Image: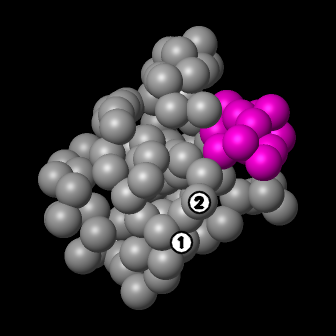
Amino acid sequence: MAENIAQVSDDSFDSDVLKSPVPVLIDFWAPWCGPCRAIAPIVEELAGEYTGKLKIVKMNVDDNPRTPARYGVRGIPNLILFKNGEVQQQIVGAVPKAHLVKAIATVV
């Protein structure tokens, strides 16, 4: 995993995501999920391109069931954009990079 993508947990979610001074894109994923593995390189590219403007984190849904349940995550990959602790957009499925860039543009 890219060095500028942090793993977050149920316990660290509030401080890492909701209280972040910059917008956050969280990638809900699991190791057994093929589409999650397919979108991972795109998420890593974005982490490099938006350094300092957007924080990108990942959460393994198998290890952290509380947060996905809290945000209605039923399918993965599921990416949620937060700004000022509020959900701005939710993107479900392995989507093209252009789709993610367009969504990110609404918060950075």
Using the image as rendered, state which of residue 86 and residue 33 is in the foreground.
86
Residue 50 percent location from the top left of the image: 75, 37
* Secondary structure at numbered mark 1: helix
Residue 38 percent location from the top left of the image: 58, 35
Task: Of the two numbered discs 2 and 1 on the same chain, state the one appearing first in sequence.
Answer: 1
The C terminus lies in quadrant = top right
Mark identifier at residue 21: 2
Using the image as rendered, state which of residue 15 and residue 6 is in the foreground.
15
Q: List the residue tagged with mark 1.
A: 16
Residue 90 quadrant: top left
The N terminus lies in quadrant = bottom right
* Secondary structure at numbered mark 2: loop
Count of numbered badges drawn on the protein = 2
Going by the numbered disc 2, the residue's amino acid type is Pro
Going by the numbered disc 1, the residue's amino acid type is Asp
* Highlighted magenta segment, given as a residue range: 41-54
Residue 8 percent location from the top left of the image: 53, 72
What colour scheme has been applied to the protein in the rendered image?
A: one colour
Q: Is residue 69 visible?
A: yes
Q: Is residue 60 visible?
A: no
Query: In percent of the image, x 80 and y 33: which residue is there?
Result: 49
Q: Residues within 10 Å of mark 1 (few under 14, many from 20)?
A: some
